[in-house]
Image (tube, helix red, strand yellow):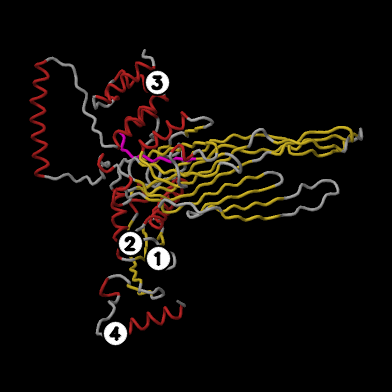
Amino acid sequence: MTLFHCLFTALLATSALAQEGRRLPDAEETGSQRVSVGVFEEPYVVDVTIYDIADLSQSLSPSATPEDEDPDAAIVRKKEQRRQAAERLGQAVRDFVEPKWRPEVNVLQLAGSSSLVVSGTQEQHKWIVSFLTGIRQVGDQMLFGEVTYIEVPRGHLSKLGVTTPTSLMWTDDVQKLVKRAMRAEDVSIVRGPRVITRPATTATVSVLKQVAYVKSYDIRLIAPEQVLIADPVIDTVSEGYTLLMSGIPLPGGLYGATIKFDRSAIQRPIETREIRLATDPESTATISSPVVTHVSINSKVLLELGQSVAFSTPANDEDRDLLVLVTMVSFTPALERLDALGYVGEQED
Amino acid sequence: MMDQQQLWARVHRALDDRRDPFEDTELEAWLLEDDQALDEVLRLRDTLLSLGHEVRPRKREWGRSVALAAGIGGLLVGAGLIMERVLAPPTSVRPEPPSVAQLSPNGSRARILEVSISVVTESESARTETTFDGQQFTRQREVQSSAGTGARGPRSDTLISTLVPVRFTP
């Protein structure tokens, strides 16, 4: 259906309403601007509402204060932190609102860090009100996130009960799966450090190792001896993983999680080859040509308490598969317990 | 000082009795010294809490008369709490952990909204990229010849193959 057809249909619908004696309410009547957008087969009616989020921008900002901070710098820092907190809230609305966000129709803008201006349907605004109310009631709630990845010979994930690229599991199913993997042969299991974060805050865990290798040789002429030498060129490759995860409570007891997982692995043994050096045609040198596999997973999921999400993917080009399990658990700890474990920073007065 | 076996026996005994292991002060002190064990116990306790298991307060070994006084006091407090709830319903709206009856994948409201997976293998001579967009895997391979003395310039052959679509679990 062409754009012209859609607009023409919308025009006809509007005029039909007028002929029937019904008129669209105007701004003074509803207290908000009501716009009928007819570029779809059915009119998609949106309202513009302004939400006050000044308290949330403050409560979702980090509370720790650097020592001996200049007062002017403190003002700039706090302002920037509040702006970032407001942006995270806005992004959470775009990611998880129901009905789903439609960029061609819905609009979200921030007025500084104190107001959220949203153009959406009535159902979407109901969801947003429920969402912001829920965030206000979060209190001391913390989120635990952790990643476990299991590497198996190609085709063996089915023996662990994993048959689809993505799946959702309860925590006890995850534990059974890990135990099953521990009993299998030629399986490697890596459990990442657990991260603790507040809702709507991104936690990053990065466990990387750099490996240096000789990539090539540069031939250099050394004066005044006029001697040619082969100078090795050293390069590095990284292997390990990085996990970025954020979670936020949503209406209905669900948690919205944004997950970005990257893993790099070097194929071993590292390939090498002999090259001839111009300094001496009879001599050779060895250079390395590492083969590196990068796995990247980006996902947005809705989880219930105690659930995990699993992603299965090839681990390399040849003979290994990878299963990545991401778990998020929410709880409200006693602050003194967190303090004893060193998780709580200084509170701002 | 406890060894690992004694520590875990004590932890499991507490959990079997539906008690919080951290109520045991000696156990708590030992766990704070052992980060790995602490992590494991916290994880175990969180799992149980998320499954809706209750943790009862520790039963203290007092004399009978003190226990009787505590019991009577508890009854009075309980009666007071009941009256308070009747007169003023609780205002907390924090979602409760799911009950055991809800622990069925079919009854879960969870779902995956978006997912993209890419696997890139790079070497000096070739680059292979496999991507998954939520519906199917697609594989693309580029090959480059190594440049040597008198060798040709680099060439690129691109082979695109689409693997059999796999079911995407929403």
The type of residue carrying mark 1 is Asn
Chain of residue at mark 2 = A
Q: Which residue is drawn at 66% across and 40% down?
A: A291
- Residues under labels 4 and 2: Cα distance? 27 Å
Q: How far apart are marks 1 and 3 (CA)?
A: 53 Å
Q: Tell whether position A308 is magenta.
A: no
Q: What element carries label 3?
A: helix
Question: Does residue A348 appear anywhere in the picture?
Answer: no
B39 over A21 or under it: above or below: above
Q: Is residue A10 visible?
A: yes
**Lateral position of residue B95 relative to residue A144, left or right:** left
Parent chain of label 4: A
**Percent of width and height locating residue A232:** 77, 35
Residue bearing mark 2: A124
Q: In the rendered structure, are the residues bearing label 1 and label 2 in contact, judged by CB atoms less than 8 Å apart?
A: yes
| Residue assigned mark 3 | B33
Amino acid at dot 4: Ala
Residue A18 shows which numbered tag? Answer: 4
First in residue order: circle 1 vs circle 4? 4
Tell which residue pokes out farthest to the top in this image: B1
- In the depicted structure, whether residue A8 falls above or below residue B64: below
Mark 2 closeness class: few <14, some 14–19, many ≥20 residues within 10 Å: many
